[in-house]
Amino acid sequence: MKSAIRWLIGGVTVLSVLGMWFLYPHRVEGEAQGGKEIQAFTTDGQFSHELFDQVLQKYVDSQGRVDYAGLKNDPGTLQSYLDLLAVNAPSAKATFQTGLAFWINAYNALTIKGVLDHYPTTSVRKIKLFGGFFSRIKFRVGGRSYTLDNIEHDIIRDEFGDPRIHFALVCASVGCPILEKRAFVPETLEERLDNATANFINNPEKVRLDHENGVLYLSQIFEWYAEDFEDTHDSVINFISEYLPEADAAFLERGEVQIQYVEYDWRLNAQVGVETKQK
C-alpha cells in the first residue's frame, strides 16, 4: 500500500512538473538588469523609444530583414529598452497614439527578444510547438507578465480597434509585414500606419489581383483577422480597395473576383547571407 502511494505521489509530481513546463516553459523575459541609469522618458514626458529605434536602424535592413546573429552578439541596447518596458506602461490618461505606439513597439521588440533567446532557428514555429512562441513565452511589461498573444489580442486589437495594426506588428516571419527601421512614435503614428498598410497591400507577394482570371490573391492575414477589417469597412475587399490603384479598385468594386488566400510564409525574417541552423 505504501509503495503504491509513493508511486502515486511520484507520478503526480512528474505530471505537475511536465504541466508547468508545457504551459509556462520559458522564464519571464525583460526583468530589469540594474546597474545602469536609463532615461525612460523624453523631455515632454513621453515614454522614449529611442533605444529600440537605435536597434532597428543598426540591425534591420531596407527589406525589413533582421541581423539576428549580429544582434545576439550585441544585445545591450535592446536589453536596456526591454528593461524600460519591464517597469513602464502607458497610463490611463495616455493618448490613443501614445498607447498604440507603445504597444506596437513592445510587441515587435519582444518578438525579436523571443527569437534571440532561441537563435539560431529558421522559424518561430520551431521554437515552441503548437503556437507556443506566441502563447506560452512570457515577457514583463509595466510590472506585469504578458505573452505576445496577450499583447496583440487582449490589448492592441481589443483596446485600439484599428485594423492597420496588422501591417505594423511583425511576427518575425517572411509572411509578415516588413519590420521598419524606425520605432513608432505618437507624432507620426497615423501616417506610419497608413504607409505600412499601403506598402503591404501593394506588395504583390502579399496582395495580387489577377484581372484575367478574376482572382484576388491575399495574405492569410486578411483571412485570420477578417472581422477586424469588417468592423471598420463593409468587407475585406472594401478595405483593400482604399489602398490600391484606381484601376484595380474599380475592378474589385464590380464584384467579379474570387478570393484565394496564399499560404503564410513562416520562415524567419533573417537577413540573407546570415547563417542559421535548424533548431
Image: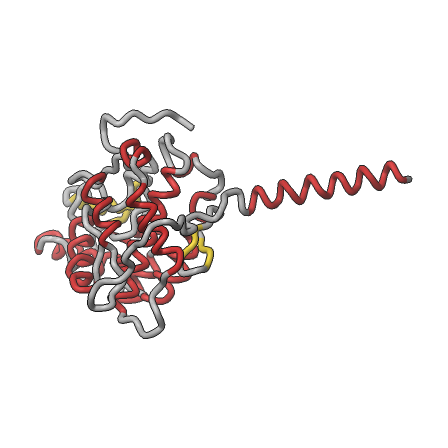
Nearer-the-camera pick, 270 or 83: 83
User: Is 46 located above or below residue 26 in the figure?
Assistant: below
Q: How is the image coloured?
A: secondary structure
Left or right: where 136 falls relative to 82? right
Residue 171's x, y, as percent? 33, 45
Any part of residue 219 in sight: yes
Left or right: where 200 falls relative to 25? left
Residue 210's x, y, as percent? 17, 43
Viewport quadrant of the N terminus: top right
Left or right: where 250 falls relative to 135? left
Residue 179's x, y, as percent? 24, 45
Nearer-the-camera pick, 146 or 224: 146
Q: Residue at x 39, y 42 (%)?
A: 114
Q: Residue furthest right?
A: 1
**Residue 185 falls in image quadrant:** bottom left
Q: Residue at x 47, y 39 (%)?
A: 128
Q: Residue at x 33, y 57 (%)?
A: 226
